[in-house]
Image (tube, rainbow, N blue to C red):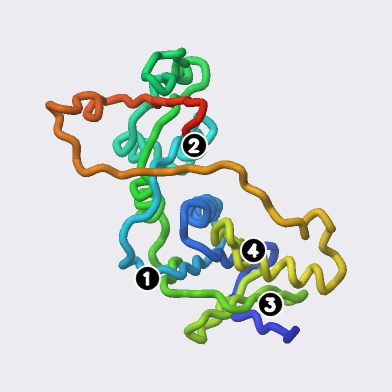
Amino acid sequence: MSLLTISHKRDQGSVKAVIVGGGIAGLAIAIMMDLAGMEFEILERSTGDEPPMGCAVTLGPPVLRLLEQMGLLPQIERASKPVVGLTIADGEGKRLGRVDGVEEDRYGYPIRIITHHALHRILLDRVPKANLHRGKLVVETLQNPNGVSCKCSDGSTYYGDIIIGADGTQSLTRERMFKQLKDQGKLPDSDMEASCYEHLCIGGITNPLDKQDYPTAHDDTSEFQVIYTKDVPYT
């Protein structure tokens, strides 16, 4: 492992982070660091020209409280709808029961639903543009007592004190960190086991729905509809 030359100047006791990944997690971390007056750089592999990705995201009271502390709650409320309940039906459409939504008076916030694209855009608009670097695929990470570095596929290198891996479930940052720990004999056996995710989510996106034919789709609130059947998969 080569020695690093730290290129950034900082006050004693301050920390600079290199955040790998400009998705929901990476942007949220960056905003919190910015509010705390900390230094950071975001390395995002996408160029920004890709089509919107993702489906809907539900935001519970703990998340909404955090978004309010970020100063983003008004934008979130304009782009989302409160979830007023969940209705459960069987395969024949017979209603089995209903669960009301979260009581705002009790928890401070309702549950809200928002598109992934809208949430990402709200966070993206809050991050200082000078700290976001697009088209940056990190191919090498190094660390030693002097600090850390991230080398990108275009030959650029970014230096800091810590690396934050926010590059998704198949994180290459985590994979490299695990390899380094394994080579040093510091990786627990439990972390070497294959991860298992036993939940399947199938998302569908419609064309815009006519208000006359689908009036509930244009309500100010939303509701989950769950259908359980005995012999049909993915229900």
Q: Is residue 96 above or below residue 14?
A: above
Q: Is residue 234 above or below residue 154?
A: above
Alpha-carbon distance for marks 3 and 1?
24 Å
Can you identify the residue that label 4 sits on?
15
Image quadrant assignment for residue 161 = bottom right
Can you identify the residue that label 3 sits on?
142
- The crowd level at tag 1 (other Cα within 10 Å; few <14, some 14-19, many 20+) is few
Q: Residue at x 43, y 26 (%)?
A: 226
| Number of the front mark, 1 or 2 | 2
Q: Position of residue 40 (x, y in %)?
A: 54, 64
Residue 150 left/right relative to 153: right
| Number of the front mark, 4 or 3 | 3
Assign the N terminus to one quadrant of the image: bottom right
Q: Which element type, helix, strand or loop, lies under badge 2?
A: loop
Image quadrant assignment for residue 174 = bottom right
Q: Is residue 112 above or below residue 150?
A: above
- Label 4 with label 3: CB-CB less than 8 Å: no
Q: Residue at x 51, y 36 (%)?
A: 63
Alpha-carbon distance for marks 2 and 3?
45 Å
